[in-house]
Image (cartoon, helix red, strand yellow):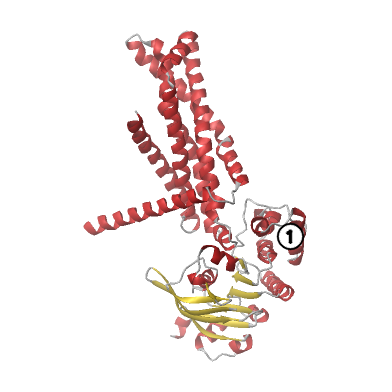
Amino acid sequence: MIEIKELYKSFGKQQVLNGVNLLINEGEVTAVIGRSGGGKTVLLKHIIGLLKPDSGSIFIKGKDITKLKGTELDEIRAEIGVVFQGGALFDSLTVYDNVAFPLTEKTKLNKKQIYEKVMKALSDVGLEGIENKYPAELSGGMRKRVALARALIGQPKIILFDEPTTGLDPILVRSIHKLIRDTQKQYGFTGLIISHEIPEIFEISDRVAMLYEGKIVEAGTPEEIQKSDNIVVKNFIMGIEMEVLE
Amino acid sequence: MIKFFGKNTIELLLFLGRMFIFLIESIYHIFTPPFKFLNFLRQVRFFGNKSMIVVIFTGAFSGMVLALQGYYALNKFGAEALLGPVVALSLIRELGPVLCALMVTGRAGSAVTAEIGIMRITEQIDALTVMAVNPIKYVVVPNILAGIVTFPLLTAVFDLVGIYGGYVVSVHALGLSEGTYFSQMELYVDMEDIRIGLYKSLSFGLLVTWICTFMGYNAGYGARGVSRATTNAVVLSSVVILIWDYMLGAFLL
């Protein structure tokens, strides 16, 4: 479904991605774990075409999106939903208008059809009765749910989650993870989650990949990753600083 | 020294280039559908309606102070009868467009920069892009169009209120006759003067919204990035207003 090949990206003198290779299978949830500031979000922004790599390619359904522009890129984007780190909800719009936004802007559905879809998406993420509130009136967890509803509404084939649980308490982390898992089963999308929630992330992922120093150092099922002999992976899971050992 | 000078020159050229491309892109999106008419109306209300109070106040006091100072100067060579035209011409040709643009920059321009800057740092601009909605069309173009429409209208209000402010001071405080104030004004103010004022306010509308949206769109990271963008937008807009006013004045005179 998504194939990343030899992706390099630097900002000034800082090399952020250093030859990333990763395969994301269709219908699965893949988690990319790694330290904060390790380039995970940069990787995600490449997949949606917000950043262009220095070299390398990303194939989505056989098309190299790093080479696409304008309408062609928009066509691919229409099949991808993104849940941003802070939700990225439009503060000038109500919850209803936020969730309806992809439909009102990009489809010709009438008001009634949009209303039905928005209500379903909100009920799927466990939020009802808050349609008229503004994002600023919501708690962090609710904002993430609304962001997920907005990503789901266009029924995209792929959803990218950029640290969907950052800043939430452990109970909410679990509830958002469960929500991702449940909606994934219901909608059948291919998911990519950028996260550093260890060990919770293992429960909801089909595959896990570890990004370290701009490269994927290990990828496999959650069990394989947890049993990995790779010192970088082991230390990350146990929460030990690499520098301490070195 | 040379290295420093060269580096800054290159950075300045790059900055101007980026600004210019931003403007071209915005103009392209003004003329290509889909048109965001509701967003445009909302921004017209934001720029126009909500700047009205500040424009009325500054307009009134500008006209009043012009009358006061103008009377003092004209009185020295017995030409008080020309106070009406002095107030009207200064306002219509010069002070109206400039002061009004400076006030609207401070009130609405800064808010536009801050709003777009916050949309940038909270990834709302990215969210628009990934939903295949062009952020320039959605966020920038309505502001630029609203600026072009509202600046001349606000300037007209400014001029009108200013002229009546001048009237109050001239007639009621300085004892000039009502007929003199207005009849001399009619005699000396041409359509050409009004046209110059209109050209100025139209171009200020474009310049201010262009600078303010560009700064917000390219705001750096965090609260500091937004505050810096807002300051830069207001300072640059104000300086550009005065420079452009002089250039246009010299060109059109």
Q: Secondary structure at mark 1?
A: helix
Whole-percent x and y of residue A75?
59, 66
The kind of residue on which mark 1 rests is Val
Q: Residue at horizontal 62%, vertical 83%?
A: A207
Q: Is residue B1 visible?
A: no
Count of labels shown?
1
* A153 sits left or right of B175 in the view: right
Is residue A27 shown above or below A154?
Answer: below
* A55 sits left or right of A72 in the view: left
Relative to the observer, which residue lies in front, A203 or A64? Answer: A64
Label 1 marks a residue whose chain is A
Q: Quadrant of the C terminus of chain B?
A: top left
Is residue B65 shown above or below A183?
Answer: above
Whole-percent x and y of residue A243?
45, 81
Q: Quadrant of residue A120?
A: bottom right
Relative to the observer, which residue lies in front, A136 or B103? Answer: B103
Q: Residues within 10 Å of mark 1 (few under 14, many from 20)?
A: many
* A223 sits left or right of B81 in the view: right
Whole-percent x and y of residue B183?
46, 11
Q: Quadrant of the N terminus of chain B?
A: bottom left
Whole-percent x and y of residue A87?
62, 62
Q: Residue at horizontal 63%, vertical 85%?
A: A222
Q: Is residue A50 visible?
A: yes
The residue that mark 1 highlights is A118
